[in-house]
Amino acid sequence: MANHKPLLIGVRLEDCYLRKLLSHSNAPIVMRVIRIMGFDNRIELYIVIHAKKSLVRALSRNINKMENASFTILYSERSVHLVVMSFPRSNCRRFSKCPLAGSFEGFVPLSSGIMGREVVGVGLALSRKVVSSLREHGLEVFEISSNAIQKPLTKGQRWMLFEAFRNGYYEYPRRISLKDLAKRLGMSVSAAAEKLRKAEVKAINNYILENIIVEVFLDKIMEGSSPPISSKVDSPKDETGYGHNSDTGPD
C-alpha cells in the first residue's frame, strides 16, 4: 500500500506579532519554537534562540519594558539560549490559525526565523489542501523538499554502523580498514561495503532532514539570499499527498 509523503515547505508571515516583539534588534534572529501554549488571556512561548549573549540580553531588557510582555532567559550558553516569552493573547491575531503554533491543521512546524519585517516558518505540509489553505490565509509558501520523510535503519544496518564506529572505521585516520572490518564481522568485503553503504545513505539522509535542510533554508533567508527551494508549490502529484513512498528496495 502506497504512503503519501509530506512536503517540506517554507512559509512567510509578514504580520506575525513575534516580529514586533523582536523588532528591537536589527540583526537576524534564528529561533526554534519548542512549545506555544495558549491560555485564556495570554500566550506563552518556549523558544531556543541562536544569537550572541549581548543580543539576547538586550531583547530581555527591551521586551520586559513593554506593557504586559515578559522575556525570561531560562538557559544561556555561548550562542544558544532557551527563553520563555509571554504576552496578551489579544496581541496575536493569527494564533487560532498559526503555522508556528501548530494550530494550523495539517502543518507540522519544525523551525522558524525572524528577519526585518518577516517571520519565516519551516515545516511539513501533510497534503495539498494544507498548502491551499495556507495561501488562502495570505501566507506565501515555498517548496524546500518533497523527500521529507526519514527512512528508519533496519536492525542490521544499525549494527553495521555501530560496529564500524566502534572499531574506528570513521576516525581520521581510520583505525581499521574495510577489509579488516569485514573479516571481523564474518562477511566478504563486497557484502560489508554494500551493507555499510546502504546504512550510511539512510543515516546521512535522516541527519540532513533533521538538521541541515532547515538550517540552510533559514541561513539563506537571513543572508538576504534566495532560499534554496526547488520551486513554488504548484502542482502536487495527487489529490491528497505529494507522491508515494516507493522505497521498497533491499536493506
Image (spheres, rainbow, N blue to C red):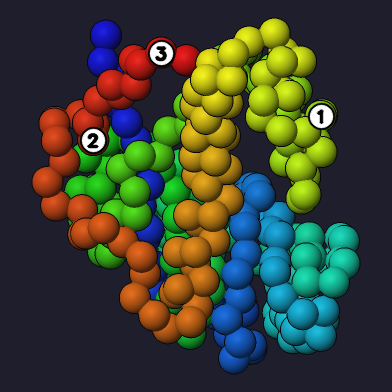
Q: Give the amino acid at mark 1.
A: Asn
In the rendered image, residue 91, in percent from the top left (x then y), is placed at: 53, 68
In the rendered image, residue 80, in percent from the top left (x then y), is placed at: 78, 65
Q: Secondary structure at mark 2?
A: loop
Q: Residues within 10 Å of mark 3 (few under 14, many from 20)?
A: few
All told, the count of numbered labels is 3
Q: Residues within 10 Å of mark 2 (few under 14, many from 20)?
A: many
The vertical placement of 157 against 32, above or below, is: above
State left or right for residue 152 relative to residue 244.
right
Q: CA distance from mark 1 to mark 2?
A: 41 Å
Q: Secondary structure at mark 3?
A: loop
Q: Which residue is mark 3?
A: 250
Q: Give the amino acid at mark 3.
A: Pro
Residue 22 position by quadrant: bottom right
Q: Give the amino acid at mark 2.
A: Tyr
In the rendered image, residue 21, in percent from the top left (x then y), is placed at: 61, 77
Q: CA distance from mark 3 to mark 1?
A: 25 Å
Q: Which residue is mark 1?
A: 167
- Mark carried by residue 242: 2
- Nearest to the observer: residue 104 or residue 184: 184
Q: Nearer the viewer, mark 2 or mark 3?
A: 3
The vertical placement of 53 against 140, above or below, is: below
- Mark carried by residue 209: none
- Nearest to the observer: residue 30 or residue 25: 30
Residue 59 visible in image:
yes
Q: CA distance from mark 2 to mark 3?
A: 24 Å
Q: Residue at point 41% right, 13% down?
A: 250
State left or right for residue 7 relative to residue 120.
left
